[in-house]
Image (cartoon, grey):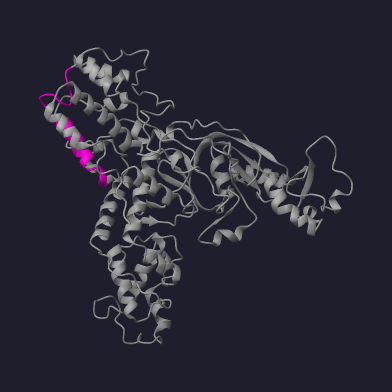
Amino acid sequence: MLLNRTFLGAFLLGTASLIPFQAAVAQTTDPDVYADQPRAAQSTPLVDTSRATDRPQPAGEAVRSAGAAPAIDNSPLGQALRRAGVTDPAVAVFYAARDNAPFWTGADEGWAEALLASLQNAPAQGLPENLLDPAALRAALATGGPEAEARFMKAYLSFGRIISSGLLNPERVDDEIHFQPVRPVPAQLLASLHAEGTAPDSLDFLAPDLPEYARLVEELARYRRLASEAVLGGTVPEGPTLRPGDRSPRVAALRDRLQALGDVGLAVPATTIMEKITDAAATTGPQQSRPGAADAPAGSTGVDRSFFDPELEVAVKRFQLRNGLIDDGVVGPQTLRTINTSAADRYNRILVNLERIRWLHRDMNERHIFVNQADFTMEFVENNQVLLASRVVVGQTPKHRTPEFIEMMDHIVVNPTWHVPNSIATKEILPKLKEDPSYLQRNGMRLVPTGADPVPDGVTSDYSMFSRGYFPFRVKQEPGDANSLGRVKFMFPNKYAIYLHDTPSKRLFERDARAFSHGCVRVQKPFDLAYKLLEGQVSDPKASFDGWLDTGRERRVNLDRPVRMYLTYRTVWIDRQGEMQFRNDIYGRDARTIAALASAGVDTLD
């Protein structure tokens, strides 16, 4: 069972957050734009068949190198291992310590049965039903001998890699995912095998040892039941907006569906919901004049299920909060569509997000910034405490979607200059200049020649000769309140020209769906983020930062404590109050991952 795991050392607890991201990066001052870059032809398979990551492993792990360990010998077992493709020196060390005695197929087959149990239970964790062909393994176990031993060892190493770090290669799933899971090497997996004592019931302890993962496994089973047994029943029929105080057969259907989803009659976390809900008396008072409201029951007692009472209003608000909607307790078109989302669709999205957890184990004790693009939010976390939470704006679709990657934030720029990308200068600014040559001056911008010669006289009054294909200048916007980057940007150098920054367009943060940028991430609370980053570096972070702002001059400030930066995409997760959260698949990455999982043999639902 997941609750009884013993964790595989420090590796599976969070090495994804301890290992530096090894992608080639280049520092850039380009602005708020994600330019789609051609990717090299992919030769790696969709299903990740690599044995281990090529990134450095955590300090302290007993990983033997090929030069320090013996090779697989020529014994019958050694030959069988080579035929099975198991040649890692750590395997040779493992069997040498046992004098080549079998581990899986010896007198005690407990470990083999544990592996078979986990393989048979793989679908419960969103993996293929016939992962690594457990039926063939059981037949081999009955036969015994070196070939069976080799097959079990190969299956174990593959299972350990998949259950701990994912079935798929994320970079092959989507061109905008730019990280690779940290794969365990055989020595790490073999370290968890021991001949002493009783074998475990299963090897599920190799799965991510995270409460969220275990909870999503439970929810996967629940939504499978909801889908297979049609527990949700029919959808709520289309019709006018439903409001507290209404009475309608559609209200009864709404109540049934929310009850099945778990939003009626359950405890409601006070910090996330009840504080946002006004007093029930204040809610129902002005509505007594609504048709049928005067003789309505005070709560959901089963007497009048068609009445939209205060209890149902709380349930609707709870549902809205769990789905990133305005929590007004009113069932309008958007809330209705979300309520009517099928259990099969939600099941598939849980599958996707289980795989995302396997790809990336987030170490909540590490000091880091975590951006969830699908939720339009950012968290600055240390020691499992949220130091700062903020709304964000991410890249708009379809051309400027924010990519996923991991980097180290190492400096901030106060009063930044915006070096306008050529694509924005020619596609967006040039047409405005042709209509209004004073546009640059009015917006604190200027032309910069691309060559040694200055900008010719007269250019700034007539732009008719220029086009997208011919514009031999760059555009810069000077620091100031009108600067598109705001008053500060947060840099984690990367080849995608992506960073966090302030913005003068504060009104966009009031939207629920906030995909409006050219790819970079705009932060609602940039000054607070700067103060937090500078804590421990200067005696008074606010005074120092505000002083730099007041100069009006661009200033780079290196961070004494660089911070790991996660740009991620999670559409299903468990929040800190234990609530299951769903968000829309704004970039279509869920759909692509579902298709990839199905191609790899995972049982998705229609």
- Is residue 19 shown above or below 317? above
The x and y percentages for residue 98 are 19, 17
Q: Name the residue at 36% across, 61% down.
A: 270
Tell me if I can see residue 594 in this picture.
yes
Would you say residue 120 sits in the magenta stretch?
yes
Quadrant location of the C terminus in the rendered image: bottom left
Would you say residue 410 sits in the magenta stretch?
no
Q: How many marks?
A: 0
Quadrant location of the N terminus in the rendered image: top left
Q: Quadrant of residue 140?
A: top left
Using residue 113 as the reference point, say whether residue 459 is left or right of it: right
The x and y percentages for residue 169 are 41, 38
Q: Quadrant of residue 496?
A: top right
Using residue 140 as the reference point, say whether residue 297 is left or right of it: right
In this orientation, which residue lies closer to the viewer: 300 or 53? 53
The x and y percentages for residue 33 are 62, 46
Tell me if I can see residue 480 in this picture.
no
Q: Quadrant of residue 438?
A: bottom right
Magenta residues? 101-124
The x and y percentages for residue 246 are 37, 81
In this orientation, which residue lies closer to the viewer: 552 or 109? 109
Q: Residue furthest left?
A: 107
Q: Residue furthest right?
A: 457
Q: Name the residue at 77% across, 45% down.
A: 471
Using residue 9 as the reference point, say whether residue 485 is left or right of it: right
